[in-house]
Image (cartoon, rainbow, N blue to C red):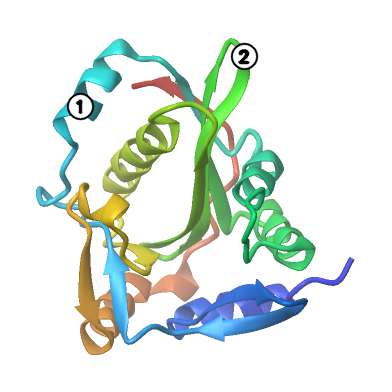
Amino acid sequence: MERIPPHVLLGAYTEGVFPMAEGGEILWFSPLKRGLIPLDDRFHIPHGLKRVLKRQPFEVRRDSAFRQVIEACGEREETWIDEVIIESYLHLHETGFAHSVECWDEEGLQGGLYGVSLGRAFFGESMFSHKADASKVALVHLVEWLRREDYLLLDTQWMTDHLRQFGGEEITREDYFSLLDEALEGMHEEQPRTASEEQSSL
C-alpha cells in the first residue's frame, strides 16, 4: 500500500503543513488562520459535558485501537481520509509519533480522536462519535494528558463552532509559527513518545 514517507509527513508538520486526500490525490495545507485549543485555564468544559463526565459513561484508553479510530474518522459521506492517509498515520503510530484517544463501553468503541505528537506540540487530525459525547470526552482526556506532559500547543488546523465551545480560537499564521517554534524547540533531543496503552475513567 502506498503511503507518505514518515520523514516527509513529520517534516511537513514542523513547517506548519498537513495533508488531506482529495480525488485520489494528496493535497497539502497551511491555513492563513490556525485553530487552537488552549491548554491553560482558557480551556472550557461546557456545563452539560461536566455532568456527563461525572457519570463516567466511558472507559478512556489511549493507543489501544489506532486503526479502528482512524478508519471510523474516515467513515463519512465526504472524507479526506483515504487508504494512503490511513497507512501513513498507522506507520507514524507504530513509530510512536501518532496517538489515539478512545472511549469504550460494554458495547465497544464509541468515539475517539487521533493526531500527531512532535516535541511539545500535538496536531489533532480528526474525531468521531458513535454515541453522544464520546468524542468530547476523548478531547477532555487529551487535554488532561497534554497538560500532564507539559505540552505547549494543541493544533486543530481549522476552527469550528464545535471546538469554540471548548475555548478554541483562531490565531494568525505568524503567531502560530511562533508557538510552533517554541513547542518544537529541542525536539531533536527527544525520543518519540511510545504508543503504550493507558486506561482511565473520566
Name the outermost residue toward the front. 77
Q: Is residue 139 above or below residue 47?
A: below
Spot occupied by residue 120 in the image (x, y as percentages of width and height): 36, 62
Q: In this orientation, does residue 34 appear?
A: yes
Spot occupied by residue 20 in the image (x, y as percentages of width and height): 60, 73
**Residue position for label 2:** 107
Q: Is residue 14 above or below residue 160?
A: below
Q: Secondary structure at mark 1?
A: helix
Residue 115 left/right relative to 121: right
Q: Residue at x 59, y 76 (%)?
A: 19
Spot occupied by residue 109 in the image (x, y as percentages of width and height): 60, 26
How far is mark 1 from mark 2, CA to CA? 23 Å
Question: In which quadrant is the C terminus drawn?
Answer: top left
Q: Closest to the observer: 4 or 145?
A: 4
Q: Secondary structure at mark 2?
A: loop
**Residue position for label 1:** 48
| Image-quadrant location for residue 6 | bottom right
Q: Residue at x 20, y 48 (%)?
A: 165
Q: Is residue 148 above or below residue 12?
A: above
Q: Closest to the observer: 13 or 189?
A: 13
Of the two numbered discs 1 and 2 on the same chain, state the one appearing first in sequence. Answer: 1
Q: Identify which amino acid the numbered label 1 is placed on.
A: Gly
Q: Identify which amino acid the numbered label 2 is placed on.
A: Glu
Q: Residue at x 46, y 70 (%)?
A: 189
Question: In which quadrant is the N terminus drawn?
Answer: bottom right
